[in-house]
């Protein structure tokens, strides 16, 4: 299968509000070894949404996140088509499917701001927004697991090693291979962790596992989103979990 990447290089500091500034990890339970709602998707088919043809991974991943959030929140799954996802990719980046030179990928902060202000459109014409977003420390696995457990899906940017697509094809976890070169940037929502301790991601329409070592080595940015689509279903947060100086800023989305 043809695989496309499409995440632009990380811009340190582009998202000024840090996850650790908002959430007091010491006041939250430790995530269980195994967690996630990835099995809510019938047949495990998350749909490629154009990402095997175009470098729209940031917006394909956004659609996957909203699919999961709506199901986890007890609502019917939001449905997205490739056309829907490409329309938002075009709105943000100027992409034109008839002009290959415009397929240049997406900056994660720019996409997050668009998702907060405009939202991404689904097949029914409904726009799905995020309420706020904060920066995850690259390679901090404890923070990543906590954010994924709290919010069911978080956005992760990785620098892709050359073995990534072969391991995906073989359905074996992404793991570090000595001598790999970097072939591009990619956006993959983290949606859980399995009993082996491997983190679970959505990419190219499928669920795929990655070893902690792989994530630590290749993650170069991450974003934790607050989606109101799951907020009623979440029982993991309490007022003590928030750092009060940053709570108001976070809820207002002043990132």
Image (cartoon, grey):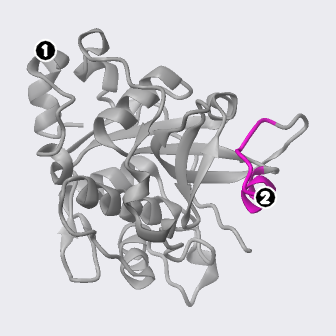
Label for residue 240?
1
Is residue 87 toward the left or the right of residue 158 in the image? left
Residue at image coords 10%, 38%:
252
In the image, farthest residue toward the top: 26
**On the picture, is 123 further left or further right than 8?**
left
The residue at 53%/85% (across/down) is 97
User: SS at mark 1?
Assistant: helix
- Secondary structure at badge 2 equals loop
Residue 131 shows up from this direction: no
Residue at the image position 28 percent from the left and 76 percent from the top: 122
In magenta, the rendered stretch is: 164-176
In this view, the residue in front, 39 or 73, is: 39
Q: In the picture provided, is 231 more to the left or to the right than 198?
A: left
Q: Quadrant of residue 14?
A: top left
Which of the pair 41/248 is nearer the observer?
41
Residue 170 disc label? 2
Q: Earlier in the sequence, mark 1 or mark 2?
A: 2
Residue 245: % across, % down: 13, 16
- Residue 214, magenta (yes or no): no
Specify whether residue 165 is painted magenta.
yes
Front residue of 19/117: it is 19
Q: Position of residue 47 (x, y in %)?
A: 50, 73
Please tell me which residue lies in front, 197 or 215.
197
């Amino acid at each position: 299968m043809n695989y496309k990447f499409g995440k632009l290089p990380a811009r340190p500091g582009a998202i000024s509000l840090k996850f650790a500034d908002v959430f007091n990890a010491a006041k939250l339970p430790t995530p269980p070894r195994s967690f996630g709602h990835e099995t809510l998707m019938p047949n495990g088919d998350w749909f490629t949404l154009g990402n095997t043809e175009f470098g729209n991974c940031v917006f394909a991943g956004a659609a996957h996140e909203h699919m999961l959030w709506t199901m986890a929140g007890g609502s019917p799954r939001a449905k997205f088509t490739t056309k829907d996802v490409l329309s938002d990719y075009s709105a943000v980046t100027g992409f034109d499917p008839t002009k290959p030179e415009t397929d240049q990928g997406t900056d994660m902060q720019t996409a997050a701001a668009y998702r907060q202000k405009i939202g991404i459109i689904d097949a029914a014409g409904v726009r799905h927004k995020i309420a706020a977003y904060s920066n995850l420390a690259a390679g901090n696995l404890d923070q990543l697991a906590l954010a994924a457990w709290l919010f069911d899906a978080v956005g992760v940017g990785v620098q892709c090693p050359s073995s990534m697509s072969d391991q995906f094809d073989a359905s074996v976890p992404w793991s570090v291979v000595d001598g790999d070169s970097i072939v591009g940037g990619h956006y993959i929502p983290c949606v859980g962790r399995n009993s082996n301790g491997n983190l679970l991601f959505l990419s190219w329409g499928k669920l795929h596992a990655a070893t902690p070592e792989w994530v630590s080595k290749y993650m170069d940015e991450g974003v934790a989103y607050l989606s109101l689509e799951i907020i009623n279903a979440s029982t993991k947060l309490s007022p003590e979990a928030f750092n009060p100086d940053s709570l108001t800023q976070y809820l207002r989305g002043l990132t």
